[in-house]
Image (cartoon, grey):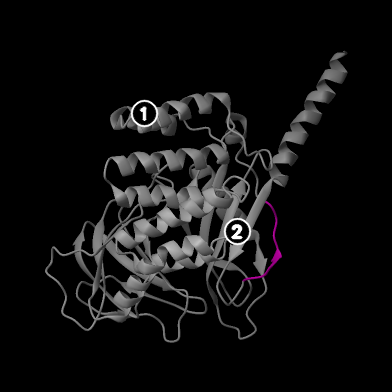
């Protein structure tokens, strides 16, 4: 083969790799009753350095659509792969355009998942990953928690995993957290695994089982608004009738508690999505009632924003002050911002007096996890 043909082939392969990376980009937009419809939707550039390492990425962004159809005030809710993928996702979202609401109002609480895949539909793990995975599974089976923790920490530190491997590793880290007795951390890793997984990577009974485990953890931790959303998502899965029936008693308990007068006190922690110096530390909570307040701040907890389908509101965090969700609001999330590692109690008010300061009935960790 001549040098000219070698150079031409090399250039062809380089162009193919770049195009493949750009083409293998999927998005999912989701709001409840008001849907942000994209009219201009260019694909992002794959972070060049990460393409060479094989690292794939996934980013979940919450944003508002203004009266000009632009995405404004984006919040990185979660991500896998690190800061370069977050930057690429934010840059791309800034170029998108949406149909403005006919009313001229903002369209609130939009959510999008951006998947950065080198090969579309590559639901396969490398032999290197599988060796590590089998060692972790063996340690977990033998209840060798310290050894399992060491192996998962090594795998997280190494990085460079495709999205399918990221799903498997998040599930493994969640199991390790569970064996160590940290249910809140187990919940966060199971949530991330489900978010990142495509329908091909996690499907059927396996997918429904993850939904059920997430619901059970949310129920145990008192995250009642999130638990009801998880139950609804599980109900949307095929062949989920028996799964929902198994959870029905706890679903009824949650609804009864929400309708009752006991306040719900959620211990929350702030963290950056990418576990890096860039980004904003935040915590997100799905309320089940209309009113809430803050207490027991540790560290710098500055401000919050409530995002609902068609409205939003926000203010500085003040201890003891009662805040209300926007009138006639639906599908609301409370985003709280401050310093990484800061914590606070979010109290959903009821008819009964607040419990003692040390009484916490819900636990919420928005901790940075697998990257």
Secondary structure mostly seen in magenta is: loop
Vertical placement of residue 164 versus 361, above or below: above
Q: Position of residue 232 (x, y in %)?
A: 49, 68
Q: Which residues are the magenta region? A: 36-43
Whether residue 308 sits left or right of residue 36 in the image: it is: left
For disc 1, the marked residue is 139
Disc ID at residue 364: none
Q: Position of residue 231 (x, y in %)?
A: 46, 65
Q: Residue at x 30, y 55 (%)?
A: 339
Asked whether 354 or 45 is in front, the reply is 354
Numbered disc 1: secondary structure: helix
Q: Residue at x 48, y 79 (%)?
A: 311
For disc 2, the marked residue is 93
Residue projecting furthest to the top: 1
The local crowd at label 2, few if under 14, some if 14 to 19, many if 20 or more residues have their Cα within 10 Å, is many
Asked whether 78 or 47 is in front, the reply is 78
Q: Residue at x 40, y 59 (%)?
A: 215
Camera-side mark, 1 or 2? 1
Vertical placement of residue 140 versus 344, above or below: above
Q: CA distance from mark 1 to mark 2?
A: 42 Å
The earlier-in-sequence mark between 1 and 2 is 2
Vertical placement of residue 119 versus 68, above or below: above
Q: Position of residue 203 (x, y in %)?
A: 58, 50
Numbered disc 2: secondary structure: helix
Q: Quadrant of residue 334?
A: bottom left
């Amino acid at each position: 083969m001549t040098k000219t043909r070698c150079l031409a082939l090399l250039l062809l392969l380089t162009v193919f790799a770049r195009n493949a990376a750009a083409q293998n980009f999927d998005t999912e937009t989701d709001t409840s009753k008001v849907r942000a419809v994209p009219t201009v939707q260019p694909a992002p550039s794959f972070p060049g350095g990460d393409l060479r390492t094989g690292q794939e990425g996934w980013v979940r962004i919450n944003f508002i659509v203004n009266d000009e159809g632009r995405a404004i005030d984006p919040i990185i809710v979660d991500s896998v792969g690190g800061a370069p993928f977050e930057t690429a996702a934010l840059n791309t979202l800034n170029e998108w355009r949406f149909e403005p609401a006919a009313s001229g109002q903002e369209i609130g609480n939009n959510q999008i998942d951006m998947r950065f895949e080198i090969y579309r539909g590559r639901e396969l793990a490398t032999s290197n990953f599988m060796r590590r995975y089998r060692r972790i599974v063996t340690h977990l089976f033998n209840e060798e928690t310290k050894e399992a923790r060491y192996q998962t920490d090594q795998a997280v530190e190494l990085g460079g995993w495709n999205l399918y491997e990221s799903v498997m590793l998040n599930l493994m880290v969640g199991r390790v957290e569970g064996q160590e007795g940290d249910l809140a951390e187990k919940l966060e890793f199971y949530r991330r695994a489900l978010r990142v997984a495509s329908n091909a990577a996690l499907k059927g009974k396996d997918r429904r089982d993850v939904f059920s485990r997430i619901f059970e953890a949310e129920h145990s931790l008192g995250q009642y608004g999130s638990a009801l959303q998880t139950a609804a998502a599980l109900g949307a899965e095929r062949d989920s009738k028996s799964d929902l029936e198994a959870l029905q008693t706890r679903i009824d308990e949650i609804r009864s508690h929400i309708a009752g007068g006991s306040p719900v006190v959620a211990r929350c922690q702030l963290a950056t999505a990418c576990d890096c110096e860039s980004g904003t530390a935040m915590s997100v909570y799905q309320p089940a009632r209309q009113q809430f307040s803050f207490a027991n701040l540790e560290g710098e907890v500055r401000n919050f924003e409530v995002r609902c389908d068609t409205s939003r509101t926000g203010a500085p965090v003040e201890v003891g002050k009662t805040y209300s969700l926007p009138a006639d609001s639906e599908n609301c999330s409370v985003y709280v911002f401050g310093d990484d590692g800061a914590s606070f109690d979010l109290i959903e008010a009821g008819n009964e007096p607040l419990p003692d300061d040390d009484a916490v009935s819900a636990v919420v960790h928005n901790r940075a996890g697998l990257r």
